[in-house]
């Protein structure tokens, strides 16, 4: 499985709605996108790669899950320890998921240039279609 993947969530009694399922062409992973009680999740082989909150009308929320906010806070503190950086920092993300980390970085630092790559083109397509990622 991919590095940095969140663990499988425990089973829930809420109704899950499968929006998309495909086997990726490069790694052969099973990619799924599900809506589950106010969260949209992108998973590879059952391991959550990205989550975004859904509003009552089904649109994506800009608020991020607590785990992502905590991770981004730690990364921000790490950047502070690096000393002065460029006015427009450049970030390379290996593995896209639903694009949550890229979205948070861009929101936190408007001048930040984020480049994300993923080995599976199906992940990129799902991020654009189901997670509102602008390509």
Image: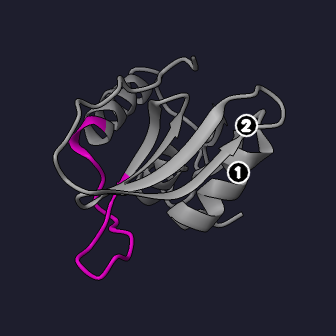
Crowding near the residue tagged with mark 2, few <14, some 14–19, many ≥20 C-alpha atoms within 10 Å: few
Residue position marked by numbered label 1 in the rendering:
124
Q: Seen from this angle, which residue lies furthest left?
A: 13
Q: Which residues are magenta?
A: 52-67
Cα separation between marks 1 and 2: 7 Å
Closer to the camera in the image, 25 or 114: 25
The reply to whether residue 123 is visible in this rendering is: yes
Q: Seen from this angle, which residue lies furthest right?
A: 26
Residue shown at 46% from the left, 25% from the top: 5
- SS label for mark 1: helix
Residue shown at 67% from the left, 29% from the top: 29
Closer to the camera in the image, 87 or 45: 45
Residue position marked by numbered label 2 in the rendering:
118
* Image spot of residue 108 (x, y percent): 40, 53
58 magenta-colored: yes
Residue shown at 54% from the left, 45% from the top: 32
Closer to the camera in the image, 134 or 49: 49
Residue shown at 50% from the left, 38% from the top: 43
């Amino acid at each position: 499985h991919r590095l940095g993947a969140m663990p499988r969530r425990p089973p829930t009694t809420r109704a899950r709605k499968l929006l998309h399922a495909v086997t990726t062409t490069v790694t052969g992973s099973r990619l799924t996108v599900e809506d589950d009680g106010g969260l949209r999740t992108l998973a590879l082989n059952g391991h959550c790669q990205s989550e975004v909150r859904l509003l009552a009308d089904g649109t994506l929320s800009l608020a991020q899950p607590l785990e992502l906010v905590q991770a981004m806070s730690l990364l921000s503190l790490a950047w502070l320890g690096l000393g002065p950086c460029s006015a427009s920092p450049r970030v390379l993300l290996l593995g896209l998921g639903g694009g949550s980390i890229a979205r948070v970085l861009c929101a936190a630092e408007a001048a930040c240039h984020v480049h994300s790559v993923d080995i599976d083109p199906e992940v990129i397509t799902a991020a654009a279609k189901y997670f509102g990622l602008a390509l």
